[in-house]
Image (cartoon, rainbow, N blue to C red):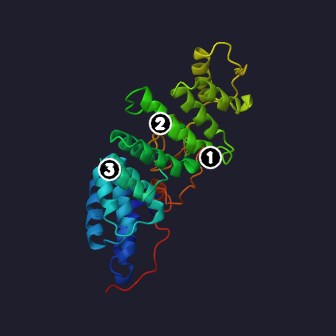
């Protein structure tokens, strides 16, 4: 009945289930779903708040309440309820880490929850550069680069709170040493591009050209062209040959649910409203098999229920 949006019939069967002590948990979950599907969002939240108090270890209730607030971009409440869980399951760790940063928490603390989030890693780099502690910022990149492969992490490292030429050269020395050790492990050209970009940011044009030359012209996208243009302005008679026709566009963040593309990351997909489903296509992060928020509510709402137990 819930799947068919037949709310009257659903309520009729809920009234029957309510009188079965062993089915109380099913009744509670179904009631939450019925309220939500009936667009009674405030009532849904009120019920979930009480259920979270009654069942402090229940993942389903805490996750759903948190995500209701996340959809409203009330990051503090969204983080509050996911953080109340004593034991956070792996599939919620990335989500919780991102909420911590979005709600104003310290990026370093969020990083202890998960280093799989590009946003969390990027904010941690900024936090460390503000201190300033460029060595620790470089260590964060060292530990995360192999799986994240996101050029803007290098852009942040090479540009955030720069104090002068000496500072940028020190950063280049650190980051180039890290990335050079990884260049042969990466078949995607992201590390070569990162080195080329870092060289151009530090005005070390020869090294920048060298790493850009290592990327086959047929693999160039708009980001390689941007570095090429920086080099060509500084080096007369540069030997780099710009491809006659750009065959690839710059990679975009992509929602794994609806395939929506954007140049920016969002916790909530602007198109399908799914939560934490927008991924960087070059990264090697495995997709978390977490229940998709709206689909679970609206399409198959009572799956994965635990076995009924008698009430204590």
Q: Is mark 2 on a helix, strand or loop?
A: helix
Mark 3, Cα crowd under 10 Å, few <14 / some 14-19 / many 20+, is some
Residue nearest the observer in this picture, 15 or 85: 85
Q: What element carries label 1?
A: loop
Identified at 37% across, 32% down, the residue is 161
Residue 35 sits in quarter: bottom left
Q: Which residue lies furthest to the top in this view?
A: 236
Query: Is residue 297 visible in this depiction of the protein?
Result: no
Residue 62 in percent (x, y) is at 35, 63
Residue wearing tag 1: 181
Q: What element carries label 3?
A: loop
Q: Is residue 124 above or below residue 15?
A: above
Residue wearing tag 2: 171
Mark 2, Cα crowd under 10 Å, few <14 / some 14-19 / many 20+, is many
Query: Is residue 289 visible in this depiction of the protein?
Result: yes
Identified at 38% across, 69% down, the residue is 87
Residue nearest the observer in this picture, 87 or 62: 87
Residue wearing tag 3: 106
């Amino acid at each position: 009945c819930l799947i068919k949006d037949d709310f009257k019939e659903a309520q009729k069967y809920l009234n029957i289930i309510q009188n079965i002590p062993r089915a109380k948990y099913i009744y509670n979950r179904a009631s939450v779903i019925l309220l939500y599907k009936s667009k009674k969002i405030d009532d849904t939240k009120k019920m979930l708040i009480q259920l979270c108090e009654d069942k402090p270890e229940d993942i389903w209730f805490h996750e759903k309440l948190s995500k209701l607030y996340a959809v409203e971009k009330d990051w503090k409440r969204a983080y509050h309820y996911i953080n109340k869980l004593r034991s956070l399951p792996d599939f919620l760790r990335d989500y919780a880490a991102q909420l911590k940063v979005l709600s104003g928490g310290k990026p370093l603390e969020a990083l202890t929850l998960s280093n799989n989030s590009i946003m969390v890693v990027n904010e941690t780099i900024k936090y460390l550069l503000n201190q300033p502690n460029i060595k620790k910022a470089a260590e964060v990149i060292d530990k995360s680069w192999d799986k994240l492969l996101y050029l803007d992490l290098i852009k942040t490292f090479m540009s955030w709170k720069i104090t002068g030429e000496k500072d940028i050269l020190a950063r280049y020395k650190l980051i180039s040493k890290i990335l050079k050790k990884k260049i042969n492990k990466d078949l995607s050209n992201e590390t070569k591009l990162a080195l080329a970009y870092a060289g151009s940011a530090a005005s070390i044009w020869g090294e920048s050209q060298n790493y850009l030359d290592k990327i086959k012209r047929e693999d160039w996208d708009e980001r390689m062209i941007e570095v090429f243009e920086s080099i060509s302005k500084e080096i007369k008679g540069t030997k780099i040959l710009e491809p006659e026709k750009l065959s690839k566009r710059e990679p975009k963040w992509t929602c794994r649910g609806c395939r929506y593309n954007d140049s920016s990351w969002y916790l909530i997909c602007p198109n399908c409203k799914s939560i934490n489903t927008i991924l960087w296509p070059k990264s090697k992060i495995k997709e978390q098999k977490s229940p998709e928020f709206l689909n679970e509510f609206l399409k198959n709402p009572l799956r994965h229920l635990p076995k009924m137990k008698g009430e204590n």
